Image: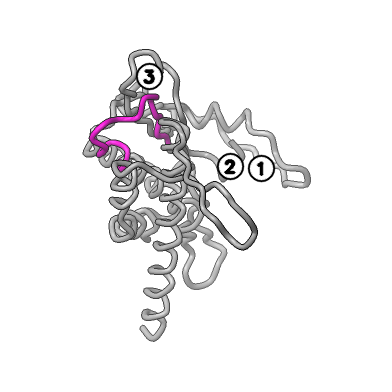
Amino acid sequence: NTHLPKRVEKMNKKMMNVKALCSAALVSQCLILSGTVFAQTNSTAGAKQVPMLPATMQATVDRISAESMRGHLTFLASDLLEGRDTPSRGLDLAAEYIAAQFRAIGLEPAGGDGYFQNADWNVLKKEIRRRPGAPVPPAEAEPTTPTIVRNVIGVLRGSDPVLRDSYVLVTAHYDHVGIKESLAGDKIFNGANDDASGTVSVIELAKAFAGMKERPKRSIVFMTFFGEEKGL
């Protein structure tokens, strides 16, 4: 495949960009959760303050791995998951994968069914407001069995006995638009950037925070959800 080197190079750049965003998110969450430490520096434009992280937090930032994110993204955006449409087999596989990562990290399950917050898509889709100008969907026969879709939720409990009852949310949608049979050639919309990359960031941030020697004072909810591409 003559395009493979360019695709690999593009993936490497994407992972470095995602790592940078993860690091920035981690820094901002650390500042929110543990207080800001500032250092004053001089510049040609005058003195300014820049946030400085304690060594333990910097070590946490340094543990964010572009290689690890690349591994997660390669699976979530693979053809095996068929574009992660809501609902679909690929969406279910993605939910199981994310839950497995949360379990390995050691997050506390926070759904009604372990890490899963279940819903019946047959009920939810009736409540979605169509965008202006969107075509009216064709009438369908009323299904006789539920079509289960799942948000995936894990919690990292805070260390402070009082502040642990307040929560910071880190979220991303993990669905995409699936397969378009009307297209010629490759029919799968893999959704690497929308939003497998965001889902990977949630996983990597959860791992980084869970690996801290001293946990943040406030609890953190890590959540990935379905149905964004359908208007939820």
Q: Quadrant of the C terminus?
A: top right
The disc, 2 or 1, on the residue closer to the chain's N-terminal end is: 1
- Residue 89 position (above or below residue 156): below
Between circles 3 and 1, the one closer to the viewer is: 3
Mark 3 in CB contact with mark 2 (< 8 angstroms): no
Using the numbered discs, state the Cα–Cα distance from disc 3 to disc 1 in whole angstroms: 45 Å
**Residue closest to the far top:** 162
Q: Which residue is mark 3?
A: 164
Is 219 in the magenta? yes
Near mark 3 (Cα within 10 A), the count class, few <14, some 14-19 or many ≥20, is some
Q: Image quarter for residue 8?
A: bottom left
Label drawn at residue 65 = none
Disc 3, SS: helix
**Amino acid type shown at disc 2:** Lys
> Is residue 174 among the parts visible in the rendering?
no
The x and y percentages for residue 47 are: 59, 52
Viewer-nearest residue: 142 or 21: 21
Label 1, secondary structure: give it: loop
> How dense is the environment of label 1, judged by Cα within 10 Å: few (below 14), some, or many (20 and up)?
few
Give the residue pinned by disc 2. Answer: 230
| Relative height, residue 208 to residue 221 (above, below) | below
Which residues, given as a range, are shown in magenta?
207-223
